[in-house]
Image: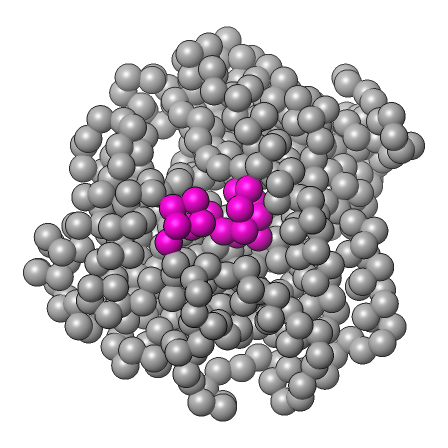
Amino acid sequence: MEKSMGAATSKPKLPVLLTPLPGPKAKDVIARDAQFVSPSYTRGYPLVAKKGSGAIVEDVDGNQFLDFAAGIAVVSTGHCHPRVVEAIQKQAAELIHISGTDFYVPNLVELAERLAAVAPGKEAKKVYFGNSGTEAIEAAIKLAKYHTRRDKIIAFHGCFHGRTLGALSLTASKAVQRKGFGSLLGGVFHIPYPNSYRCPYGNPSPCTCVESATFLEREIFKRLVDPEEVAAVFIEPIQGEGGYVPAPKEFLLELQRICRKNGILLVCDEVQSGMGRTGKWWAGDHAGIEPDILCVAKGIASGMPLSATIARASVMDWKPGAHASTFGGNPVSVAAALATMELLASQYIENAKRMGDFLQSRMAGWPERHKIVGDVRGKGLMIGIEIVRDQKTKERAGEFRNDIVNRAFEKGLLLLGAGENSIRVAPPLMIDEEQADFAARTLESCIADVEKSA
Ligand SMILES: Cc1ncc(COP(=O)(O)O)c(C=O)c1O
């Protein structure tokens, strides 16, 4: 077991495991959870978290883990960053709630200004605040329909946009997420997501997958729906839950062209890929696209519930009462977001790029060294590793992936799966090289162990 207390501070930077996992206190919580908590949650391994600091999470038995999942890509500045905690405490002592729906709040305006300033495109922006990613998508669906007076929507296979019924209608990630919930929103058409490693049109890898955009013109607009009835195309510029799959730049530019030509709004769901995770504010910035509506959540407030639907001002033209939320943009979450944005802008976006490059350079050789690694991909600290049974057939190996993620947990490294057979590497954006190095070594050794036993 690796141990390090870190040179600059007395806080540990690497895992310290004291008990078998789960420890006795963790076992007790897990048993009570089974009795009282919704069984719809999907816990892969038994982490019972008690506290967090930076990239370290401590469980109820005192075991410390290196967190490369970041609360599902949420704690962008790390756990309990002192500046974020201070901002939350100060705001909580001053005003916790008033509702931005009915009253004006200065820090909400300030955050809207800051988000508008970093959103892509020159046109002025307006911002709607909600509490979660799915709410950002709901707002985008409603705004797109309202503004265009059209009611059809295009979305992509494999994408995850949330679980409320509107957002779920766009989600096409796993059937279990839709099963049992009856008919969803009508007028939603799904088409294949571009995938450079597994081109849906059978092209060899790597592929720019431009056909995934032109498919709209060649098939959908001819056979299923007239483009004049389409309000919006929703896309994750890097697919998150679906497997950490980046959409190629050429595809995104072509998709934007088709949208513009047909008066269709381009909606980028950057709930997971945004807020600096990829080494730029937005994953779409790598391609230079300018969405009409941008959906943001997860990393925006370092763990406080908040989301933003940012639109071109001319698009956000709905009237008072058309859409609102009691809690959306509550002052405490907003204070956390302002502190988060400052930290991201001053150091962590740059760090995400540096650490992402470092990790990807360490991982680039894995497909050659390990026959169960099919692909390593991503941008910044949004890295996907696809695990396969056979590199030639690319047969997906979900059981191997689960085994690798569980073994990493046993070694004190927290990871999550994504899609059927990928590992997602999504640490807080403040990790340092020692932590990135530990994660790369640990993950590679888990891959090697699973490969041997395969
Ligand atoms: C791209 C994307 N959109 C939307 C959502 C939904 O966000 P939430 O779980 O906060 O509702 C998620 C959550 O994982 C996501 O990754």
Colour mode of the rendering: one colour
User: Is residue 283 a member of the stretch shown in magenta?
Assistant: yes
The verdict on residue 351 being magenta is: no
* Residue 200 in which image quadrant: top left
SS majority, magenta: loop
As drawn, 330 above or below 397: below
216 with respect to 186 (left or right): left
- Hey, which quadrant is residue 243 in on the image? top left
Nearer-the-camera pick, 150 or 338: 338
User: Residue lying furthest front in this view?
Assistant: 122
Q: Which residues are magenta?
A: 274-289
Q: Is residue 223 above or below residue 280?
A: below
Position in image of residue 2 (x %, y %): 77, 18
Is 119 on the left or on the right of 190, as rendered? right
Q: In the rendered view of the protein, which quadrant contains the N terminus?
A: top right
Where is residue 247 drawn, in percent x and y?
A: 35, 43
> What is the residue that sits farthest to the right in this orientation?
10
User: Does residue 116 appear left or right of residue 95 in this picture?
Assistant: left
Residue 248, compared with residue 444, is above or below; it is below
Q: Which residue is at 78% across, 56% downward?
A: 84
Total residue callouts: 0
Res. 358 image quadrant: top right
Could you tell me which residue is drawn at 53 percent across and 21 percent down? 361
Position in image of residue 136 (x %, y %): 50, 67
